[in-house]
Image (tube, grey):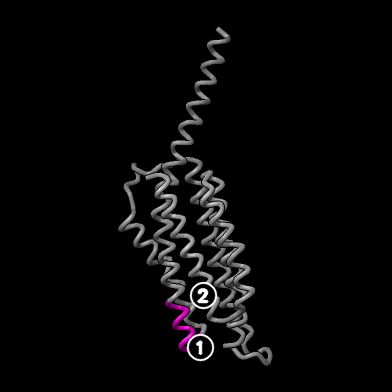
Amino acid sequence: MEQNKEMTAQESLSLITETLNSSRKEITRRSAKYYILWGTLLTVFSLIIYFLWKSTDKAAWNCLWFAMPVIGYLVAWVGLGKKQEERVSNDVSRITSGIWSTFGIFACAVAAFTIIFSHVHVGTDNIGGAVRALIALGSLTGEIVLIFGLAESACGVALKNWVMKIAGFVTGIGGLCSYYITGASHDQMLIFTFAGLVLVATGLIVKHQYK
């Protein structure tokens, strides 16, 4: 009787593990299309802002970043959204969703405080408003790309996917190194272009893995 109970417990644990692994693979497979979507948007927006900033020498074009999440969520909801009952919902999906939500909150908070900082200090010293904004925005790129890479790597850990883990390190560490090389100028937008291309490549590789 005790042996039968032990086997039953082992079988239950095996079933739970198998179910979690299956749902993790399904979540990873579904994540690929969102990686491609957001990577494409990041690439397009960064190039648009880069060329506008370069041609006009105005860092104010960075305000266009706030349009990206609006467009992204709209496209995801209309074009990529699935019925609620078709979605895989468990602890793993909630963890990955929480990771990206946390990244979004941190990114928006950093951007908001950067804009506030650049305007509040205008007139308090000899540094002009435009220059102050450039200095503040220059510090923003390194922070955003680093936490972006951290979020991607964290998702890779949660989903046990080595492609996401490596892509996160490449984006975060590689982007931060590139930031220190380019400095506070319009060239830093190309760091986000690089991050977007890495995100698209990650999505394509993951899609191929679980096709």
Q: Dominant secondary structure of the magenta stretch?
A: helix
Q: Give the residue type at disc 2.
A: Met
Magenta segment: does it hold 54? Answer: yes
Q: Give x and y (percent) for residue 109.
A: 56, 67
The circle drawn on residue 177 is: none
The circle drawn on residue 189 is: 2
Q: Residue at x 34, y 42 (%)?
A: 86
Q: Residue at x 31, y 57 (%)?
A: 79
Q: Residues within 10 Å of mark 2 (few under 14, many from 20)?
A: many
Question: From mark 1 to mark 2, how far is it between C-alphas?
Answer: 13 Å
Q: Give x and y (percent) for residue 44.
A: 41, 71
Question: Could you tell me which secondary element the residue under label 2 belongs to?
Answer: helix
Which of the two residues, 10 or 121, is positioned nearer the viewer here?
10
Q: Which residue is mark 1?
A: 57
Q: Is residue 176 left or right of residue 85?
A: right
Q: Which residues are magenta?
A: 48-58
Q: Give the residue type at disc 1.
A: Asp
Q: Is residue 87 visible?
A: yes
Work out which residue is located at the far top of the displayed protein and give it.
1
